[in-house]
Image: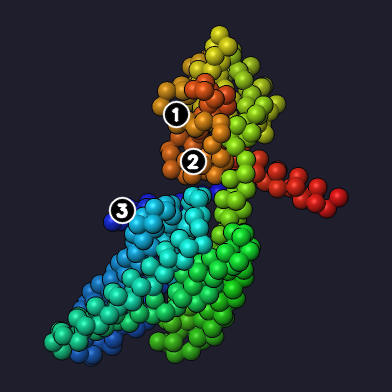
């Protein structure tokens, strides 16, 4: 799983990431919607007023999604459960981190919090709409639309397919019955893919209809596509969450990090690095003690002609400031850390002494290697 470019957002204590690709696609769809439904020039509603009201409506819908996800996070914190970072999509949010999945009960209560938050917000907005005077028309209409959006968000999210909240509840039920998080995820993802296919196919059919229906069709295609993508990513994430809990950081780095003397030239060290290109980050030693690491990209700081005359000590990253985990920590903990720290490398220690270094590529590769080895044993 390679991290995609995303906009990190802290909202009311919740950690959210908005994938930039989905952000641009959603903004383009919003612009298409405003342009397609724009009133004619002789309409009583001026075009500038239309675009202003439409922009406020889109901002309100985005804010409603944020509050929906904050509802999840607030209940999770109340239960003493850390859901980790959430990725925001057009339909809502999906877990993006590798945190402990918690228990079926916790997952059910956290999943219910989102639709209940949206329902409560929709009812409040509906009451405001009812109390507002008929003028200005666009303001009252926007409030009414936002009330409908939130009530629809609550209802649609209860469908039993991942990544919708109903799918998370369904996963928790299957997980509870089978005592297996992976089986629960697989069942919810199957239903989620079916719902995504219906939304995608229905959206394509509506795209060839009239203006208003074509707009609905575009959003259905977008939501179906996002749901399908999020469901597939959840299966991969579940593998790393479950498999990562079964292996320790110490097992991952055992014998995998090449070791280089700090006094060596960069040219000589490069031969060692290339000979073990599938190993972990290189550990730099001085007098038998680890003093730094040498990622390949650090060599770009020097011209090729300088490599025979520059030492590894000049190119290395010193240990000071690099994050550390004890060797008994699980690889799941490693993945959580690597998704949060900027360094991209974790030092693995035993009794306070550095015994290895691990990055995301190494952690993922070793987990996949172990899964393949298990599969070969099963099929023998």
Q: Position of residue 162 (x, y in %)?
A: 53, 68
Q: Residue at x 58, y 11 (%)?
A: 288
Secondary element under disc 1, as helix, strand or loop, is loop
Instruction: Look at the image and tell me whether residue 164 can be seen.
Output: no
Instruction: Check residue 338 in the rendering and tell me which mark sits there, or answer none.
Output: 2
State yes or no: discs 2 and 1 in contact (Cβ < 8 Å). no
Between 72 and 278, the one nearer to me in the picture: 72
- 73 displayed left or right of 230: left
Q: Earlier in the sequence, mark 1 or mark 3?
A: 3
Instruction: Look at the image and tell me whether residue 363 can be seen.
Output: yes
**How many discs mark residues in the rendered view?**
3
Q: Residues within 10 Å of mark 1 (few under 14, many from 20)?
A: some
Q: Earlier in the sequence, mark 2 or mark 1?
A: 1
Residue under circle 3?
13
Q: CA distance from mark 2 to mark 1?
A: 11 Å
Residue under circle 1?
322
Q: Residues within 10 Å of mark 3 (few under 14, many from 20)?
A: few
Q: Position of residue 179 (x, y in %)?
A: 61, 60
Q: Residue at x 56, y 77 (%)?
A: 195
Q: Earlier in the sequence, mark 2 or mark 3?
A: 3
- Nearer the observer: mark 1 or 3; the answer is 3
Between 301 and 240, the one nearer to me in the picture: 240
- Residue 75, quarter of picture: bottom left
- 354 displayed left or right of 16: right
- Establish if 159 lies above or below 277: below
- Nearer the observer: mark 2 or 3; the answer is 3
């Amino acid at each position: 799983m390679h991290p995609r470019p995303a906009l990190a957002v802290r909202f009311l204590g919740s950690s959210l990431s908005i994938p930039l690709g989905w952000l641009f696609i959603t903004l383009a769809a919003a612009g298409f919607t405003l342009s397609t439904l724009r009133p004619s020039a002789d309409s009583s509603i001026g075009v500038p007023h239309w675009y202003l009201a439409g922009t406020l409506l889109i901002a309100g819908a985005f804010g409603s999604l944020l509050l929906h996800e904050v509802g999840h996070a607030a209940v999770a914190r109340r239960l003493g459960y850390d859901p980790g970072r959430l990725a925001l999509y057009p339909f809502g949010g999906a877990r993006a981190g590798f945190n402990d999945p918690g228990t079926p009960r916790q997952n059910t209560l956290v999943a219910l919090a989102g639709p209940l938050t949206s329902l409560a917000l929709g009812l409040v907005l509906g009451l405001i709409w009812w109390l507002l005077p008929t003028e200005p028309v666009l303001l009252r209409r926007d409030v009414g639309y936002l009330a409908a959006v939130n009530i629809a968000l609550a209802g649609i999210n209860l469908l039993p397919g991942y990544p919708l909240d109903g799918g998370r509840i369904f996963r928790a039920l299957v997980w509870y019955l089978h005592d297996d998080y992976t089986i629960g995820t697989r069942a919810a993802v199957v239903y989620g893919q079916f719902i995504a296919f219906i939304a995608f196919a229905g959206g394509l059919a509506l795209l060839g209809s009239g203006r208003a229906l074509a707009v609905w069709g575009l959003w259905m295609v977008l939501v179906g596509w996002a749901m399908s993508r999020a469901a597939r990513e959840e299966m991969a994430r579940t593998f790393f969450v479950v498999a990562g809990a079964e292996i320790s950081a110490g097992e991952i780095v055992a014998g995998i990090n090449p070791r280089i003397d700090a006094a060596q030239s960069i040219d000589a060290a490069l031969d060692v690095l290339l000979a073990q290109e599938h190993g972990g980050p290189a550990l730099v030693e001085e007098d038998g003690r680890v003093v730094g690491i040498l990622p390949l990209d650090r060599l770009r700081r020097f011209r090729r002609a300088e490599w025979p005359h520059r030492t590894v000590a000049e190119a290395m990253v010193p240990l000071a400031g690099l994050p550390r985990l004890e060797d008994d920590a699980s690889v799941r903990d490693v993945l959580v850390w690597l998704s949060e720290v900027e360094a991209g490398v974790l030092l693995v220690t035993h009794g306070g002494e550095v015994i290895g270094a691990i990055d995301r590529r190494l952690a993922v590769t070793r987990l996949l290697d172990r899964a393949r080895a298990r599969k070969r044993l099963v099929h023998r």
